Image: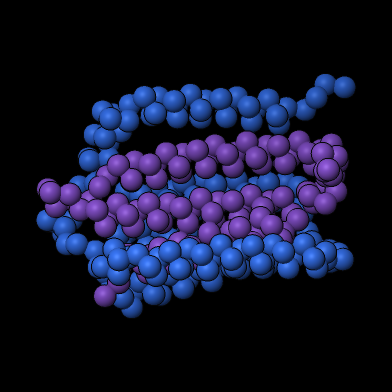
Chain colours: A purple, B blue
Amino acid sequence: MITLGDYLIVSAILFTIGFTGVMLRRNLIVILMSLELMLNAANLSLVAFSRFRVGANGLPDYNAQVFVFFVITVAAAEVAVGLALLVALYRARQTTDVADIASLKF
Amino acid sequence: MSPFLFWIFAVVTVVFGAAVVLNRNPVASALSLVVSFLGLSALFMSLDAFFVGIIQVLVYAGAVMVLFLFIIMLLDIHVEERRQINWLAAVGAVGVAVTLLVQICVVIGHSQSARRVFPPLARPTTDDVWHIGRLLFSNYNLPFQIIGVLVLVATIGVVLLSRREPR
């Protein structure tokens, strides 16, 4: 049978993949995609916990699913603003490589 | 859901998620991300969260991915050229990521409740849209309004950011 731990391990692997993408890749678009992967890994954990915590009425805990709804909404807004920033940056510098945008680097 | 289907969708999600990071071509990354999100949506539905699974497909595989592909097409980004990789930074990044994964797996391995199976539901099909909607408009009414303002601000911000500067 599938346990709660199996879902949590899938979620942890997905989060690690996203984290590695943010750290390793230098293309800003791929970094944004990796951020989406990390957010979705957190969503998978939330839904698994929601299904695991069945209340007295025999229903899952819907508070976690409302939280997932909020996360998805904020992630969609974040992608829209992030891609608009990317387009503005591309107009100014003609690059999407984070190695070329190092003005704020210490 | 049978364990066989769970493992199929888990492997699809993880493999295509890794393909997002490993592909050099951003278009291939975006298309891998679509497949990964579809697998994730199937995992949500296997947890009886049908509403969340549907909005995952609608919002991510639909809207967000179209936005990504549109921007990639608009900027005409080709395959990333090979540059000198900073090996120290790469090894450090992978090391931190693997450490994180090992830590999470150890925590899950030591947890008692992680070894338990999911308790059965009272009814096989749950009317989860009704329940989520009721929570959204009662307990979470204020956060819901704030999310609305956030989306409005994001819309105005995107319009302002993408406006061409008058020269």
Position above or below: A73 against A56: above
Viewer-side residue, A82 vs B95:
B95
Q: Is residue B24 visible?
A: no
In this view, the residue farthest toward the bottom is B4
Q: Is residue A25 visible?
A: yes
Q: Quadrant of the N terminus of chain A?
A: bottom left
Instruction: Using residue B122 as the reference point, say whether residue B155 is left or right of it.
Output: right
Where does the image place residue B145, in percent across and percent down from the top left? Answer: 40, 24
Viewer-side residue, B138 vs B52:
B138
Q: Image point 46% across, 39% down: which residue?
A: A73
Q: Quadrant of residue B78?
A: bottom right
Where does the image place residue A67, in percent across and percent down from the top left? Answer: 38, 41
Q: Quadrant of residue A20?
A: bottom right
Where does the image place residue B103, in percent across and percent down from the top left? Answer: 51, 64
Position above or below: A66 against B4: above
Q: Quadrant of the C terminus of chain A?
A: top right
Q: Image point 12% across, 48% down: which residue?
A: A57
Instruction: Using residue B122 as the reference point, say whether residue B3 is left or right of it.
Output: right
Position above or below: B118 against A76: below
Instruction: Using residue B105 as the reference point, say whether residue B2 is left or right of it.
Output: left
Q: Image point 79% across, 66% down: which residue?
A: B88
Q: Image point 46% across, 53% down: which residue?
A: A42
Where does the image place residue B48, in percent across and percent down from the top left? Answer: 27, 57
